[in-house]
Image (tube, grey):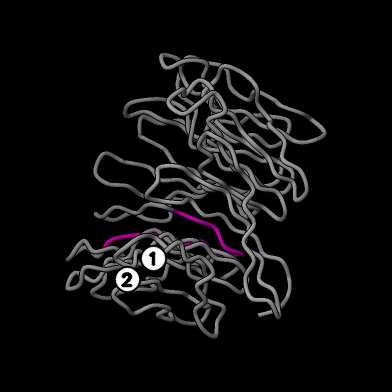
Amino acid sequence: MNGNRWSFREAMLGSGLFLLLAVVPCRAAGWTITQLTDNNYSDFTPDFSGTNLVWCANAGGDGNASGREIMLYDGGNTVQLTTNGYEDSAPRVSGNGICWQGKPDLGADWEIFYYTPTAGKVQLTDNGVNDWGAGICGERVAWHSGSGTNCEIYLYDGSTTTQLTTNAWQDMSPSISSDGVAWICNDGSDWEIFLRDAAETKQLTNNTVDDTAPCFGHGVMFWRTENPSTYLGQIAMYDGTNVVILSDDSLDNEAPVAFGRRAAWSSQDPEKESSDIFLYTGSGIQRVTDDAYDDNNPVISESLVVWSAYDGHDHEIFVYDGVGRHHPVDGQ
């Protein structure tokens, strides 16, 4: 482990209130925890990119969804990006670009908003259907629009919005990177994975099981598929040419997260009551945990894997650095 700063977020469970935390690994002093929020309302659903962190705040008071606002911490200062009567939620950040969904009241539909320091706040959609599930990569924002069984995928490229799908199927949950946009599509039978790269739209899966939760690494994609015999979750990888099943075993593997050519996920052993964390290193699969804790919700960076573990009393945060596990957060 080196002395470089690395930030992540934690949603504190059990109390119902959420805190945004930055964890800094230090070469000599161990772990330092910095509390970024200290107020009388809930802060939750954080996301980060570099030194920028965004989250939702019930600034209008807990229980008042119309007072929910988007907050930004830029590494030095906290700024409230929205001040309106909207229910603003699901913020995502990539570099200096931030997107989120908002609606003016409970009976209205969701719209997509976008912010950069130079452009300010821009409303990308204004229609009579729900626009939500947005993801962001640089200046590009992808989301799904519609309701019921007919949703379509849209892409904003920094200046123009393009409709990527036009069909009678349910296209949802886009993931976006510099390699393209991926999403899940229900073809009337099950969920399949589609990818739009610079040249064309490709259907990456065509089977009889659900393929869900696509995420991009560097030059690769990962998602959760199912064993057609047992319907247990498996992890699939697409390298630009072939689809490879990484985890063909007796475990029920959950949705992966990726960084570079690495991926992490939690797996439930049907014969035990707890989940464990697994890591794909780019060349093989490594079991990170094998204990009685319920290990879930991993996030991953270039050198670290972080997850939440229920120890029978409360949820704690653990970090794996490739050598051993560290326990920087112990709430007793």
**198 versus 78 height, above or below:** below
Q: Amino acid at mark 1?
A: Ala
Q: Residue at x 50, y 72 (%)?
A: 327
Q: Secondary structure at mark 1?
A: strand
Q: Residue at x 63, y 57 (%)?
A: 22
The residue stretch that appears in magenta:
214-226
- x, y (%) of residue 36? 64, 48
- x, y (%) of residue 227? 25, 65
Q: Amino acid at mark 2?
A: Tyr
- In depth, the one of 292 and 198 nearer the eye is 292
Q: Is residue 218 magenta?
A: yes
- x, y (%) of residue 283? 51, 82
* Disc 2: which residue: 293
Q: Assess whether mark 1 and mark 2 are in contact (beta carbons under 8 angstroms).
A: yes
**276 versus 134 height, above or below:** below
- In depth, the one of 208 and 82 nearer the eye is 82
Q: Main secondary structure of the magenta part?
A: strand
Q: Secondary structure at mark 2?
A: loop
Q: Quadrant of residue 189?
A: top left
Q: Quadrant of the N terminus?
A: bottom right
Categorize mark 1 by other alpha carbons within 10 Å: few (<14), some (14-19), many (20+).
Answer: many
Q: Is residue 216 magenta?
A: yes
* Disc 1: which residue: 309
- x, y (%) of residue 24? 66, 66
Q: Tell me which numbered mark, 2 or 1, is placed earlier along the sequence.
A: 2
Categorize mark 2 by other alpha carbons within 10 Å: few (<14), some (14-19), many (20+).
Answer: some
Q: Quadrant of residue 278?
A: bottom left
Residue 49, numbered label: none
**106 versus 259 height, above or below:** above
Distance between mark 2 and mark 1 Cα atoms: 6 Å
Q: Residue at x 35, y 73 (%)?
A: 247
Q: Is residue 296 left or right of residue 59?
A: left
